[in-house]
Image (cartoon, rainbow, N blue to C red):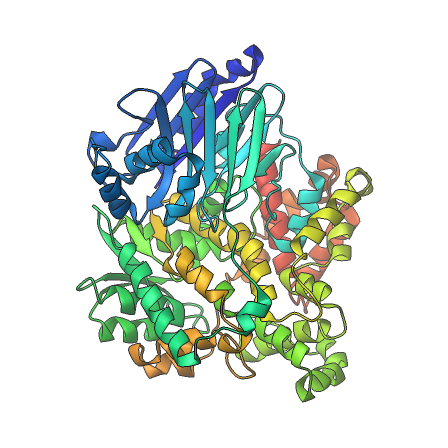
Amino acid sequence: MCGISGVYAFSDKGREVLTKLKASTNALETRGPDSQGHFVFENVGLGHRRLSILDLSADGAQPMTDESGRYVIVFNGEIFNFQELKKKLVRSGYTFFSGTDTEVLLKLYITEGRNFLKKLNGFFSFAIYDKEEDSLFIARDRMGVKPLLIYKDEDHLLFASEMKAMLAFGIQRKIDYVSLYQYLQFNYIPGPASIFKGVKKLEPGHYLYIKKNRVLKKAWYRIPFDRKKAKKNPLSYEEQQKKLVTLMDEAVQRRLIADVPLGAFLSGGIDSSVIVALASRHTAHLNTFSIGYQDEPFFDETRYAQLVADKYKTNHTVFSLTNQDLYDHLFDVLNYTDEPFADSSALAVYILSKRTREKVTVALSGDGADELFAGYNKHMGDFKVRQGGFLAEAVTFLGPLWDVLPKSRNSAWGNRVRQFQRFAEGMSVSAKDRYYNWATLADEDEAGHLLNKRVRRAMAKNIYKKRKKRILEHIHEDGDINEVLYTDMQLVLPNDMLTKVDLMSMANSLEVRTPFLDYKVVNFAFSLPQASKIDKSMKKKIVQDAFRTMLPAELYQRPKHGFEVPLLKWFRNELKTLITDDLLSDAFIHAQDIFSVNEIRKLKEKLFSANPEDVHARIWALIVFQYWWKKWMA
């Protein structure tokens, strides 16, 4: 795993930024602590930071140039089928000077041009420069596992793995207020937008081809989803289960290739347990890692993780954390984040990655299964709303009680109340509105009221409407859960889940591999009918059934809690002064001139009241933004 950045200048003025290439690359140090390299030729510059995984020798250093000197590549990621691709190239007469997948990528491009992307099984972002054509080819993997930012003006095109590397080029820092508005709704910024005007995220499964002053953007992969075909899947449910096991076993086996120590995250849930069960077929005494929460027993699932570890005789490590351990790393996360991102579970991922990196360099994870196979409560909610019946009527009848019932996330009862309230709110709206409401933590009015009049006037409402329409374009009234999952794959997966894992693992120089997001598994998942994924009593149905004989029975007899950072406790104690006297003080809000002083004051009053409900989640989003603003904008 690595970090990349680069420049393609369209003018003499654009070439001036080439002097900042090294600074941009250095900003990516944690992504690639082992070495760095730079390439500059006339109007083009490529930078690379290396985290050595395959062929640890200097032969794998980047930027890498082919034997002719014509082609140069910088690459971030892993190609898991590179060995079989390499064999075909050798049979065609090619020779290789390294054992890396980088060299295979480069020679595939030389041989086949842009079409070679469809042969790749892996995750990546890379750039290849052709000196003779003066062309630059930039691509991102199918699911968006690896990030890539793009900035283009009349003088140059810039790219980088992270925003901090983009800012090192000296671009203008103008906040995109539509992005801020969406951030206040989602707790993250939906791509392809970013927090800054002019900076875009290259969409998953897309490439750019730059030659002279022309820039071509094209989608090279889209999830092959046809709802009508999925409903008529010719395989029986038993055959579907067998195929899923085969595809997942192959995906896991492919991801065990490394020249460095490797392990797996093991939370005690179904998804990570499936990964460990399959990996143990091919690796004896697999290294596995779990987090335990001493002060939050409701969220501690280490007992279930230990059952899986014992069954497969893994070399298991539990990192037992207190709330103080979590707090001690809070500002590490805030300092590393270079774009507002308020998924508070990033803190747990950061600590897990940090501790895991002390033992291994690569870790497998179960990320992606929930989005593919309907694993979230909102999926069950959408399914039941579409089905109708007694539960829907009961929830509507109980609606007036939500205001007086406790909604804490830290107890089973509070969790149920909170989830039923969300369910009730989705009962009487359209499918599109229901999806949007359940995907956000604050609705449009709540987010809008936080912004002051100046920002609301400056926000391009037509652009917001276009972005919202794009998010919801695949949701229909007569659709089913697969449309919801398809939308999750475009919105939630790349912008929240994968962003969180990439940022927090790369902050600790750990590579995380996600077998569920193997494109063959993804393609298969979207060929399945709704009935294979969810019914009235079971989420993620086919995953649970297909691997039932491989996993301890206790895993099927427990509720899924997820994890909540104890934000409310911190806001009322350790972080109270930061809120009242600094980041959310009236004086700072007024001087900053972005948020409404009165609305922020109301949130603070609610936070410190006897019944704060879920206000701490919105306060957290504001704190993250304010901390980011002071670091990158003030």
Q: Nearer the viewer, residue 63 or 211?
A: 211
Q: Nearer the viewer, residue 589 or 373?
A: 373
Q: Which residue ends up furthest to the bottom in the rendered image?
A: 390
Where residue 565 appears, as percent x and y from the top left, is 50, 61
Where residue 448 appears, as percent x and y from the top left, is 76, 51
Where residue 449 appears, as percent x and y from the top left, is 78, 51
Q: Quadrant of residue 92?
A: top left
What residue sits 47% from the left and 73% below the top? 540
On the question of residue 574 being in view, the answer is no
Q: Nearer the viewer, residue 67 or 249?
A: 67
478 versus 153 height, above or below: below
Where residue 169 appears, as percent x and y from the top left, is 52, 24
Q: Which residue ends up furthest to the left in the rendered image?
A: 284
The quadrant in which the C terminus is found is: top right
The quadrant in which the N terminus is found is: top left
On the question of residue 468 being in view, the answer is yes
Q: Quadrant of residue 311?
A: bottom left
What residue sits 41% from the left and 23% below the top? 130
373 versus 619 height, above or below: below
- Apparent side of residue 88 relative to residue 182 in the rendered image (left or right): left
Q: Nearer the viewer, residue 485 or 317?
A: 485
- Apparent side of residue 119 relative to residue 143 in the rendered image (left or right): left
What residue sits 21% from the left and 38% below the top? 90
What residue sits 82% from the left and 40% below the top? 457
Q: Quadrant of residue 36?
A: top left
328 versus 487 height, above or below: above
465 versus 15 height, above or below: below
Q: Which residue ends up furthest to the top in the rendered image?
A: 12
